Image (cartoon, rainbow, N blue to C red):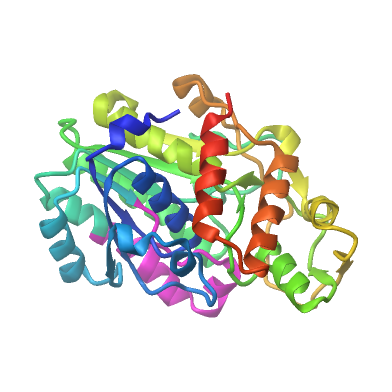
Amino acid sequence: MFDNSFYKGKKVLVTGHTGFKGTWLCKMLINAGAEVTGYSLEPPTSPDLFSISGVAEKMNSVIGDIRDFDKLKSVFDEAKPEIVLHLAAQPIVRDSYKDPRYTYETNVMGTVNLLECVRLSKSVKSVLNVTTDKVYHNNEWCWGYREDEPLDGFDPYSNSKSCSELVTHSYKNSFFTDNTVAVSTARAGNVIGGGDFANDRIIPDCIRAMQKSTDIIVRNPYSTRPYQHVLEPLSVYLTIAQKQYEDPSFAGYYNVGPDDCDCVTTGDLVDLFCKYWGPEAKWKNVAEANAPHEANFLKLDCSKVKSVFGWRPRWHIDECMEMTCRFGKIFLSGGDIPAEMDEEIKVFLDRK
Protein backbone atom coordinates (compact mmCIF):
# COMPACT_ATOMS: atom_id res chain seq x y z
CA MET A 1 0.00 0.00 0.00
CA PHE A 2 1.18 3.51 -0.75
CA ASP A 3 2.48 5.67 2.08
CA ASN A 4 0.40 8.78 2.76
CA SER A 5 3.46 10.56 4.16
CA PHE A 6 5.30 10.10 0.84
CA TYR A 7 2.76 12.28 -0.96
CA LYS A 8 2.83 15.14 1.54
CA GLY A 9 4.15 18.18 -0.33
CA LYS A 10 4.64 16.26 -3.60
CA LYS A 11 3.59 18.08 -6.77
CA VAL A 12 1.15 15.79 -8.59
CA LEU A 13 -0.58 16.36 -11.92
CA VAL A 14 -3.78 14.39 -12.55
CA THR A 15 -5.34 14.43 -16.01
CA GLY A 16 -9.02 13.61 -16.16
CA HIS A 17 -9.45 14.93 -12.62
CA THR A 18 -13.09 15.95 -13.10
CA GLY A 19 -14.20 12.38 -13.83
CA PHE A 20 -15.39 9.71 -11.41
CA LYS A 21 -12.03 8.03 -10.78
CA GLY A 22 -10.15 11.32 -11.11
CA THR A 23 -12.19 13.00 -8.38
CA TRP A 24 -11.71 10.12 -5.94
CA LEU A 25 -7.97 10.13 -6.75
CA CYS A 26 -7.67 13.87 -6.12
CA LYS A 27 -9.53 13.45 -2.84
CA MET A 28 -7.02 10.80 -1.72
CA LEU A 29 -4.06 12.94 -2.77
CA ILE A 30 -5.41 16.07 -1.08
CA ASN A 31 -6.03 14.11 2.12
CA ALA A 32 -2.42 12.93 1.93
CA GLY A 33 -1.16 16.51 1.70
CA ALA A 34 -0.10 16.57 -1.95
CA GLU A 35 -0.04 19.74 -4.08
CA VAL A 36 -2.50 18.67 -6.76
CA THR A 37 -3.00 20.16 -10.21
CA GLY A 38 -5.76 18.78 -12.40
CA TYR A 39 -6.17 19.08 -16.18
CA SER A 40 -9.43 17.96 -17.72
CA LEU A 41 -12.56 18.89 -19.58
CA GLU A 42 -15.57 20.07 -17.63
CA PRO A 43 -17.24 17.27 -15.64
CA PRO A 44 -18.77 14.85 -18.15
CA THR A 45 -22.11 14.33 -16.41
CA SER A 46 -24.83 16.23 -14.56
CA PRO A 47 -24.82 15.75 -11.62
CA ASP A 48 -21.12 15.08 -11.22
CA LEU A 49 -18.91 13.94 -8.38
CA PHE A 50 -16.28 16.62 -8.92
CA SER A 51 -18.73 19.43 -8.17
CA ILE A 52 -20.20 17.84 -5.05
CA SER A 53 -16.94 16.49 -3.62
CA GLY A 54 -15.44 19.81 -2.57
CA VAL A 55 -12.02 19.02 -4.07
CA ALA A 56 -11.93 21.97 -6.49
CA GLU A 57 -11.28 24.49 -3.73
CA LYS A 58 -8.33 22.47 -2.42
CA MET A 59 -6.40 22.01 -5.67
CA ASN A 60 -5.42 23.83 -8.86
CA SER A 61 -8.13 22.78 -11.31
CA VAL A 62 -7.44 23.63 -14.96
CA ILE A 63 -10.17 23.04 -17.53
CA GLY A 64 -8.62 22.03 -20.84
CA ASP A 65 -8.66 19.44 -23.59
CA ILE A 66 -5.96 16.74 -23.54
CA ARG A 67 -5.81 17.16 -27.33
CA ASP A 68 -4.59 20.77 -26.86
CA PHE A 69 -0.83 20.28 -26.61
CA ASP A 70 0.06 23.95 -26.12
CA LYS A 71 -2.30 24.42 -23.18
CA LEU A 72 -1.25 21.15 -21.59
CA LYS A 73 2.41 22.13 -21.98
CA SER A 74 1.74 25.48 -20.27
CA VAL A 75 0.22 23.62 -17.31
CA PHE A 76 3.32 21.42 -17.06
CA ASP A 77 5.56 24.49 -17.22
CA GLU A 78 3.63 26.23 -14.43
CA ALA A 79 2.90 23.30 -12.11
CA LYS A 80 6.28 21.56 -12.49
CA PRO A 81 4.87 18.21 -11.39
CA GLU A 82 7.04 15.45 -9.96
CA ILE A 83 4.38 12.78 -10.47
CA VAL A 84 1.91 12.50 -13.36
CA LEU A 85 -1.19 10.30 -13.25
CA HIS A 86 -2.88 10.13 -16.66
CA LEU A 87 -6.60 9.33 -16.47
CA ALA A 88 -7.99 11.66 -19.17
CA ALA A 89 -9.92 9.60 -21.72
CA GLN A 90 -13.14 9.00 -23.59
CA PRO A 91 -14.06 6.02 -21.38
CA ILE A 92 -17.41 4.71 -22.65
CA VAL A 93 -17.52 1.76 -25.06
CA ARG A 94 -20.87 2.70 -26.59
CA ASP A 95 -19.83 6.32 -27.08
CA SER A 96 -16.77 5.10 -28.98
CA TYR A 97 -19.06 3.52 -31.57
CA LYS A 98 -20.93 6.83 -31.92
CA ASP A 99 -17.80 8.97 -32.29
CA PRO A 100 -14.72 6.83 -32.98
CA ARG A 101 -12.63 9.71 -34.29
CA TYR A 102 -13.00 11.72 -31.08
CA THR A 103 -12.26 8.57 -29.08
CA TYR A 104 -8.99 7.95 -30.92
CA GLU A 105 -7.99 11.62 -30.85
CA THR A 106 -8.50 11.75 -27.09
CA ASN A 107 -7.17 8.37 -26.07
CA VAL A 108 -4.24 8.08 -28.48
CA MET A 109 -3.10 11.61 -29.31
CA GLY A 110 -3.96 12.67 -25.77
CA THR A 111 -1.41 10.14 -24.55
CA VAL A 112 1.13 11.39 -27.12
CA ASN A 113 0.62 14.96 -25.91
CA LEU A 114 0.96 13.92 -22.28
CA LEU A 115 4.17 11.97 -22.83
CA GLU A 116 5.63 14.70 -25.03
CA CYS A 117 5.10 17.14 -22.16
CA VAL A 118 6.82 14.67 -19.84
CA ARG A 119 9.71 14.35 -22.30
CA LEU A 120 10.18 18.11 -22.32
CA SER A 121 9.78 18.48 -18.56
CA LYS A 122 12.70 18.74 -16.14
CA SER A 123 10.60 18.04 -13.04
CA VAL A 124 8.74 14.78 -13.72
CA LYS A 125 10.14 11.61 -12.13
CA SER A 126 7.17 9.23 -12.14
CA VAL A 127 4.40 8.71 -14.72
CA LEU A 128 1.47 6.30 -14.71
CA ASN A 129 -0.82 5.88 -17.72
CA VAL A 130 -4.15 4.37 -16.65
CA THR A 131 -5.66 2.23 -19.39
CA THR A 132 -8.15 -0.66 -19.07
CA ASP A 133 -8.53 -4.42 -18.87
CA LYS A 134 -10.09 -4.21 -22.35
CA VAL A 135 -6.72 -3.61 -24.05
CA TYR A 136 -6.18 -7.33 -24.54
CA HIS A 137 -7.17 -9.39 -27.55
CA ASN A 138 -10.16 -11.02 -25.89
CA ASN A 139 -10.61 -14.73 -26.59
CA GLU A 140 -13.30 -14.87 -23.87
CA TRP A 141 -11.49 -17.77 -22.23
CA CYS A 142 -11.95 -18.71 -18.58
CA TRP A 143 -8.53 -17.70 -17.26
CA GLY A 144 -7.18 -14.22 -16.70
CA TYR A 145 -5.03 -12.25 -19.12
CA ARG A 146 -1.44 -11.55 -18.12
CA GLU A 147 0.56 -8.45 -18.91
CA ASP A 148 2.46 -10.14 -21.75
CA GLU A 149 -0.70 -11.20 -23.65
CA PRO A 150 -1.32 -9.58 -27.10
CA LEU A 151 -2.95 -6.14 -27.09
CA ASP A 152 -5.84 -5.66 -29.53
CA GLY A 153 -9.06 -4.20 -28.15
CA PHE A 154 -12.13 -4.93 -30.26
CA ASP A 155 -14.22 -1.73 -30.17
CA PRO A 156 -12.89 1.81 -30.79
CA TYR A 157 -12.61 2.55 -27.05
CA SER A 158 -10.75 -0.67 -26.22
CA ASN A 159 -8.57 -0.45 -29.32
CA SER A 160 -7.68 3.19 -28.67
CA LYS A 161 -6.54 2.23 -25.19
CA SER A 162 -4.45 -0.58 -26.69
CA CYS A 163 -2.87 2.09 -28.91
CA SER A 164 -2.31 4.28 -25.83
CA GLU A 165 -0.38 1.39 -24.28
CA LEU A 166 1.78 1.05 -27.41
CA VAL A 167 2.46 4.79 -27.47
CA THR A 168 3.59 4.55 -23.85
CA HIS A 169 5.85 1.59 -24.64
CA SER A 170 7.43 3.51 -27.51
CA TYR A 171 8.10 6.66 -25.48
CA LYS A 172 9.48 4.58 -22.65
CA ASN A 173 11.87 2.72 -24.95
CA SER A 174 12.81 5.76 -27.02
CA PHE A 175 13.20 8.54 -24.47
CA PHE A 176 13.21 7.28 -20.87
CA THR A 177 15.78 4.48 -20.88
CA ASP A 178 18.15 6.40 -18.58
CA ASN A 179 15.74 5.94 -15.62
CA THR A 180 15.43 9.67 -14.99
CA VAL A 181 11.67 9.21 -15.57
CA ALA A 182 9.92 6.01 -14.48
CA VAL A 183 6.92 5.14 -16.68
CA SER A 184 4.25 2.50 -16.06
CA THR A 185 0.78 1.58 -17.25
CA ALA A 186 -2.03 0.12 -15.16
CA ARG A 187 -4.79 -1.96 -16.73
CA ALA A 188 -7.75 -1.89 -14.37
CA GLY A 189 -10.99 -3.82 -14.39
CA ASN A 190 -14.50 -2.40 -14.03
CA VAL A 191 -14.92 -0.11 -11.02
CA ILE A 192 -17.98 0.67 -8.95
CA GLY A 193 -18.49 3.11 -6.11
CA GLY A 194 -20.32 6.21 -5.02
CA GLY A 195 -20.51 9.19 -7.32
CA ASP A 196 -20.42 7.52 -10.72
CA PHE A 197 -23.09 9.20 -12.86
CA ALA A 198 -21.93 8.01 -16.28
CA ASN A 199 -24.27 6.78 -19.00
CA ASP A 200 -24.22 3.11 -20.04
CA ARG A 201 -22.80 1.86 -16.75
CA ILE A 202 -24.80 -0.51 -14.63
CA ILE A 203 -24.46 1.01 -11.14
CA PRO A 204 -25.30 4.57 -12.25
CA ASP A 205 -28.30 3.04 -14.06
CA CYS A 206 -29.32 1.42 -10.77
CA ILE A 207 -29.08 4.70 -8.86
CA ARG A 208 -31.06 6.57 -11.50
CA ALA A 209 -33.76 3.90 -11.37
CA MET A 210 -34.00 4.30 -7.58
CA GLN A 211 -34.24 8.06 -7.98
CA LYS A 212 -37.15 7.62 -10.44
CA SER A 213 -38.73 4.69 -8.53
CA THR A 214 -38.57 2.45 -11.61
CA ASP A 215 -37.23 -1.03 -12.33
CA ILE A 216 -33.54 -1.34 -13.17
CA ILE A 217 -33.01 -2.22 -16.84
CA VAL A 218 -30.23 -4.76 -17.46
CA ARG A 219 -29.13 -5.27 -21.09
CA ASN A 220 -26.95 -8.34 -20.63
CA PRO A 221 -27.18 -10.02 -17.21
CA TYR A 222 -24.90 -12.89 -18.26
CA SER A 223 -21.72 -10.94 -19.09
CA THR A 224 -18.92 -11.50 -16.57
CA ARG A 225 -16.69 -8.65 -15.48
CA PRO A 226 -13.95 -8.12 -12.84
CA TYR A 227 -15.75 -5.65 -10.58
CA GLN A 228 -13.89 -3.77 -7.84
CA HIS A 229 -14.46 -0.69 -5.70
CA VAL A 230 -12.92 2.46 -7.16
CA LEU A 231 -10.58 2.85 -4.18
CA GLU A 232 -8.86 -0.46 -4.98
CA PRO A 233 -7.20 0.52 -8.28
CA LEU A 234 -6.59 4.08 -7.09
CA SER A 235 -4.57 2.77 -4.15
CA VAL A 236 -2.56 0.64 -6.59
CA TYR A 237 -1.97 3.63 -8.89
CA LEU A 238 -0.59 5.60 -5.96
CA THR A 239 1.55 2.64 -4.90
CA ILE A 240 3.07 2.21 -8.38
CA ALA A 241 3.72 5.95 -8.73
CA GLN A 242 5.42 6.07 -5.32
CA LYS A 243 7.50 2.90 -5.66
CA GLN A 244 8.85 3.75 -9.12
CA TYR A 245 9.60 7.31 -7.96
CA GLU A 246 11.77 5.80 -5.23
CA ASP A 247 13.18 3.01 -7.43
CA PRO A 248 12.73 3.11 -11.24
CA SER A 249 13.12 -0.68 -11.46
CA PHE A 250 9.47 -0.95 -10.36
CA ALA A 251 8.33 0.66 -13.62
CA GLY A 252 6.36 -1.74 -15.81
CA TYR A 253 2.91 -2.87 -16.91
CA TYR A 254 0.43 -3.97 -14.27
CA ASN A 255 -3.02 -5.55 -14.22
CA VAL A 256 -5.23 -4.33 -11.40
CA GLY A 257 -8.34 -6.34 -10.70
CA PRO A 258 -10.29 -8.25 -8.06
CA ASP A 259 -9.88 -11.83 -6.92
CA ASP A 260 -11.65 -14.53 -8.92
CA CYS A 261 -14.51 -14.64 -6.40
CA ASP A 262 -15.38 -11.05 -7.32
CA CYS A 263 -15.61 -11.67 -11.08
CA VAL A 264 -19.40 -11.84 -11.28
CA THR A 265 -22.11 -11.54 -13.91
CA THR A 266 -23.97 -8.29 -14.34
CA GLY A 267 -27.11 -10.02 -13.10
CA ASP A 268 -25.37 -11.13 -9.90
CA LEU A 269 -24.04 -7.60 -9.44
CA VAL A 270 -27.53 -6.10 -9.71
CA ASP A 271 -28.85 -8.75 -7.31
CA LEU A 272 -26.29 -7.50 -4.78
CA PHE A 273 -27.38 -3.92 -5.40
CA CYS A 274 -30.99 -4.89 -4.69
CA LYS A 275 -29.90 -6.73 -1.53
CA TYR A 276 -28.13 -3.72 -0.05
CA TRP A 277 -30.52 -1.06 -1.33
CA GLY A 278 -33.69 -2.69 -0.08
CA PRO A 279 -36.96 -4.25 -1.30
CA GLU A 280 -37.84 -1.32 -3.55
CA ALA A 281 -34.93 -2.22 -5.84
CA LYS A 282 -35.91 -4.63 -8.64
CA TRP A 283 -34.54 -5.34 -12.11
CA LYS A 284 -35.58 -6.83 -15.40
CA ASN A 285 -33.69 -8.24 -18.36
CA VAL A 286 -34.25 -6.13 -21.48
CA ALA A 287 -32.01 -7.31 -24.31
CA GLU A 288 -31.42 -4.81 -27.11
CA ALA A 289 -31.76 -5.69 -30.78
CA ASN A 290 -28.67 -4.84 -32.87
CA ALA A 291 -26.71 -3.76 -29.80
CA PRO A 292 -23.01 -2.99 -30.42
CA HIS A 293 -20.53 -5.73 -29.58
CA GLU A 294 -19.43 -6.01 -25.95
CA ALA A 295 -17.38 -8.85 -24.50
CA ASN A 296 -19.29 -11.49 -22.56
CA PHE A 297 -16.35 -12.67 -20.45
CA LEU A 298 -13.24 -10.82 -19.32
CA LYS A 299 -10.90 -11.51 -16.41
CA LEU A 300 -7.41 -10.38 -15.41
CA ASP A 301 -4.50 -12.27 -13.89
CA CYS A 302 -3.18 -9.91 -11.20
CA SER A 303 -0.36 -12.14 -9.94
CA LYS A 304 2.29 -9.60 -10.93
CA VAL A 305 1.01 -6.64 -8.91
CA LYS A 306 0.43 -8.99 -5.96
CA SER A 307 3.93 -10.45 -6.06
CA VAL A 308 5.75 -7.17 -6.76
CA PHE A 309 3.95 -4.98 -4.24
CA GLY A 310 2.35 -7.51 -1.89
CA TRP A 311 -1.04 -6.05 -2.80
CA ARG A 312 -4.35 -7.74 -2.00
CA PRO A 313 -7.88 -6.42 -2.54
CA ARG A 314 -9.24 -4.93 0.67
CA TRP A 315 -12.96 -5.07 -0.09
CA HIS A 316 -14.73 -7.99 -1.73
CA ILE A 317 -17.78 -7.50 -3.92
CA ASP A 318 -20.32 -7.52 -1.06
CA GLU A 319 -18.48 -4.76 0.78
CA CYS A 320 -18.03 -2.85 -2.49
CA MET A 321 -21.76 -2.88 -3.08
CA GLU A 322 -22.62 -2.08 0.52
CA MET A 323 -20.45 1.07 0.37
CA THR A 324 -21.79 1.99 -3.06
CA CYS A 325 -25.41 1.80 -1.89
CA ARG A 326 -24.57 3.73 1.27
CA PHE A 327 -23.09 6.54 -0.83
CA GLY A 328 -26.07 6.49 -3.20
CA LYS A 329 -28.57 6.87 -0.38
CA ILE A 330 -26.60 9.74 1.14
CA PHE A 331 -26.51 11.46 -2.25
CA LEU A 332 -30.24 11.05 -2.91
CA SER A 333 -31.07 12.33 0.57
CA GLY A 334 -28.90 15.43 0.16
CA GLY A 335 -26.29 14.32 2.68
CA ASP A 336 -22.66 15.40 3.19
CA ILE A 337 -20.77 13.92 0.25
CA PRO A 338 -17.27 15.25 1.12
CA ALA A 339 -17.57 13.78 4.62
CA GLU A 340 -18.76 10.45 3.22
CA MET A 341 -15.81 10.31 0.82
CA ASP A 342 -13.39 11.05 3.66
CA GLU A 343 -14.98 8.33 5.79
CA GLU A 344 -14.87 5.71 3.04
CA ILE A 345 -11.22 6.49 2.30
CA LYS A 346 -10.35 6.21 5.98
CA VAL A 347 -12.20 2.91 6.40
CA PHE A 348 -10.55 1.55 3.27
CA LEU A 349 -7.00 2.55 4.23
CA ASP A 350 -7.44 1.31 7.81
CA ARG A 351 -8.39 -2.18 6.59
CA LYS A 352 -5.51 -4.60 7.15
Quadrant including the N terminus = top left
Can you give x and y, in whole percent of width and height, for residue 129 in the image?
37, 48
Which residue sits at x=19%, y=50%?
118
98 falls in the magenta region:
yes
Q: Is residue 82 left or right of residue 294?
A: left
Quadrant occupied by the C terminus: top right
> Can residue 226 be seen in this snapshot?
no
Q: Residue at x 60, y 57 (%)?
A: 194
Q: Name the residue rendered at 35%, 40% in the picture.
A: 32
Give the percent coordinates (x, y) of residue 230: 56, 48
Q: For residue 3, what is the image quadrant?
A: top left
Judged by its main secondary structure, the magenta piece is helix
Q: Quadrant of residue 248?
A: top left
* Left or right, 53 with reference to 125: right
Q: Nearer the viewer, residue 74 or 225?
A: 74
Q: Residue at x 42, y 76 (%)?
A: 101
Residue 271 counted in the magenta span: no
Magenta span: 86-113
